[in-house]
Image: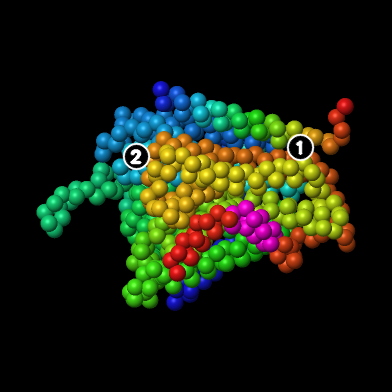
Amino acid sequence: MMDLYMVASLAVIYGLFYGFMRWCAGVVEDTGRDKL
Amino acid sequence: MGILQIVTVIVILILLVKPMGTYLYYVFSNEPNRTDRWFGGMEKGIFKLIGLKKRDGMSWKKYALSFVLTNIVLVTFSYIFLRLQRGLPLNPNGISDMEQTLSFNTVISFMTNTNLQHYSGETGLSYFSQMAVITMMMFTSAASGFSVAVAFVRGITGRKSVGNFFEDFVKAHIRVFIPLALLVSLVLVGLHVPQTLKPSLEVTTLEGQTQQIAIGPVASLESIKHLGTNGGGFFGANSSHPFENPNPLTNVLEILSMWMLPASLPYMYGLFAKNKRQGWVIFTAMMTLFVLLLSLNFYAESKGNPAINALGIESSQGSMEGKEVRFGIPQSSLFTSVTTAATTGSVNNMHDTLTPLGGITPLALMMLNNVFGGKGVGLINMLMYAILGVFLCGLMVGRTPEFLGRKIEAKEMKLIAIAILVHPFIILVPTAAAFLTDLGQGAITNTGFHGLSQVLYEYVSSAANNGSGFEGLADNTTFWNVTTGIVMLLGRYVSIIAMLAVAGSLLKKKPVPETIGTFRTDNGLFTGILIGTVVIIGALTFLPVIVLGPIAEYLTLR
């Protein structure tokens, strides 16, 4: 059972990094203009 | 004489910077060069094997994703190997499977190039695990970090793209780490470091008792342990063990092994920027901060422990508690400073027994995390501070800041701010949490201010992906395995992803022509600004906790 928790924790954390990467991509693509 | 030993090693290092930096430039510039004759054939075979015939440049997102996914695959296999090591081959000593939370901590530790060890290698790992997990990850994590640093440099120096992760990853192995590791391993074997697959030796002592002496493939692990700024030792005692580091000559070799590549990267960056002075500015800033902190450690350790001195005990050799007589103060002090500056984490003396002021040096070097740094991350962090320095100067004079001919705007600063803030956040918050919980407090073996330093050191070492331990902390528990594991992951990936995004952002911008009003970043003034920026940010962030730990301890000992 503990194995499952550890693997799930790793999966969640790496998933968060993917989310962070997408957020960074949003920052880079942001042109700085006001959004309508 | 002690200072002479230190100066000699620093001079050798400086002499190595130019040839090694030039070599690294040729390896990663992807332009045809002489090294293709030696390694080109082997690389082509590997590229063919992995289906990488066309090695087009990637976007920063694809590069970051390739980096993270490669790491995930390696983490998965390594976790399985550690959990099943008892039944796997090359286990002559019958080592049991590693416990779940310890396996979690260990795979993260080695994949993030931290090498924090909550286990003792000689009793916790089979030979198969030592080679297929630990040594393998020492190569791959170092090559990953190196690749990311090169990608970042390509981005900010305006190359066509940040490059191809898999090409960089293979090249870092084939042209840098494997040949150097082979060379250093052979020299270490020549200097009496063991390299064997035979089981532990059983000997009869003078008293007639039976004693087990652990041996194994030590030299091969030792070489990449330092070249890849990894730090995880074959033995629990790490580089203070006589089989890992038998004499002063191996000590100097290990110091240079872990220092040479990080110190050469700024020169490589100068070549990429087509302005070597840019590289020397970064190198000078790093070396200045390093010498200042090394001096503090050497002075404090040479003066000895004030409490012991007060008892009237002869202290002309300095504070030798926890140090090896064969290395003495200078070689211990230099090793401590280099291993924490280069974020290696191997130790040839016990950092827990450093004098309070001497203990500030490893803490501060890991807190700054940009004085040489390991596997390329130090260079990335120092360049991040350089961009911040340019931005602050731009604010002061009311000009749009530029770095290497590209305008620095709000979006780059937003990403840099996150990368700078995440480091203290993942150190100070878990440190406070550890003191608030019984699970955290239960591991502290030293009451008072030194106990605070123990906990602080554990998280600083994890966040900086250093891996050295203050030791004295009973850290092989679920609480410490899980919390330090998470801190290591955050310390590694958040700043790397954010800085790759900065590189991608700068790469898209049109270069701005240099004018008389351009703020120069390749002169002495900027070196001073860069050092000032690092010191001010570092001091503002970490000075309060340093005062509560080592400085308070020092004041109580006086």
Percent x, y of residue B526: 74, 63
Amino acid type of the residue that numbered disc 2 sits on in the rendered structure: Leu
Image quarter (top left, top right, bottom left or bottom right) of the N terminus of chain B = bottom left
Percent x, y of residue B550: 49, 59
Q: Is residue B220 visible?
A: no
Residue B76's place in the image compared with B501, above or below, is above
Q: For the residue carrying disc 1, how many other residues have a C-alpha within 10 Å: few (<14), some (14-19), or many (20+)?
A: many
Q: Which residue, given by chain and number where applicable, does mark 2 sit on?
A: B125
Percent x, y of residue B312: 34, 76
Residue situated in front as seen by the camera: B221 or B31:
B221
Residue situated in front as seen by the camera: B130 or B459:
B459
B537 falls in the magenta region: yes
Q: Is B26 placed left or right of B430 in the picture?
A: right
Q: Please give the name of the residue rendered at 39% of the width and 68% of the height, measured from the top-left corner.
A: B307
Q: Quadrant of residue B207?
A: bottom left
Residue situated in front as seen by the camera: B436 or B313:
B436
Q: For the residue carrying disc 2, how many other residues have a C-alpha within 10 Å: few (<14), some (14-19), or many (20+)?
A: many
Q: Is residue B98 visible?
A: yes
B371 falls in the magenta region: no
Q: Which mark is residue B15?
A: none
Q: Chain of mark 1?
A: A
Q: Is B409 placed left or right of B482 in the picture?
A: right
Q: Which residue, given by chain and number where applicable, does mark 1 sit on?
A: A28
Pointers 1 and 2 in contact (CB under 8 A)? no
Q: Chain of mark 2?
A: B
Percent x, y of residue A18: 63, 30
Give the residues in magenta. Answer: B530-543
Mark 2 falls on what kind of element?
loop
Q: Principal SS element in the magenta part?
A: helix
